[in-house]
Image: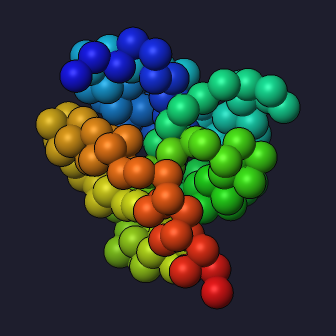
């Protein structure tokens, strides 16, 4: 599947992990934007920016965390799909409480690509229903 129209924003404070993710997903023909934290991500998106997919670490150091970033992005840009990632077990529970899909670190390039494709293939109605159910 070619994804030449899909703009994917990777937000990760670890440069090596960010580069690995960008390389793996770039091979799948995604257009890749990269940010090291939530503030940089929000500048890249801007009020009218176009991204289709947000891949963010949960722990981004100082400032908003990945869950806060994802919540803001989907509120301001409802069509954006989100995948959270972390190496911390409690982050998976936090992502689930907010209705966001999750990928545990460490991951392989193949498992990352597969998980992104799964999230992209999930119909909007199912994603929105999952988030709504978690919010109530």
Residue 63 visible in this rendered orientation of the protein: yes
4 to the left or right of 131: left
Seen from the viewer's position, the closer of residues 20 and 27 is 27
Going 67% across and 48% down the picture, which residue do you hit? Answer: 78
71 to the left or right of 48: left
The residue sitting at the right extreme is 47
Residue 15 vertical placement versus 62 (above, below): above
Seen from the viewer's position, the closer of residues 83 and 109 is 83
Seen from the viewer's position, the closer of residues 78 and 12 is 78
Seen from the viewer's position, the closer of residues 39 and 128 is 128
Residue 86 visible in this rendered orientation of the protein: no
Residue 45 vertical placement versus 134 (above, below): above
Going 21% across and 42% down the picture, which residue do you hit? Answer: 114
The residue sitting at the bottom extreme is 136
Give percent across and percent down for residue 128: 55, 62
93 to the left or right of 74: left
Give percent across and percent down for residue 82: 50, 49
Give percent across and percent down for residue 91: 45, 71
Image quadrant for the N terminus? Answer: top left
Residue 127 vertical placement versus 8 (above, below): below
Give percent across and percent down for residue 4: 39, 12
Which color scheme is applied?
A: rainbow
């Amino acid at each position: 599947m070619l994804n030449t129209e899909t703009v994917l924003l990777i937000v990760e404070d670890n440069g090596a992990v960010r580069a690995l993710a960008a390389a793996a997903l770039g091979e799948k023909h995604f257009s890749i934007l990269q940010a090291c934290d939530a503030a940089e991500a929000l500048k890249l998106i801007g009020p009218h920016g176009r991204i289709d997919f947000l891949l963010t670490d949960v722990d981004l150091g100082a400032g908003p965390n990945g869950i806060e970033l994802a919540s803001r992005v989907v509120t301001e840009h409802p069509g954006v799909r989100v995948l959270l990632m972390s190496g911390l077990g409690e982050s998976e529970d936090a992502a689930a409480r907010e209705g966001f899909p999750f990928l545990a670190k460490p991951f392989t390039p193949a498992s990352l690509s597969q998980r992104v494709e799964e999230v992209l293939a999930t119909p909007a109605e199912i994603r929105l229903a999952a988030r709504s159910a978690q919010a109530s």
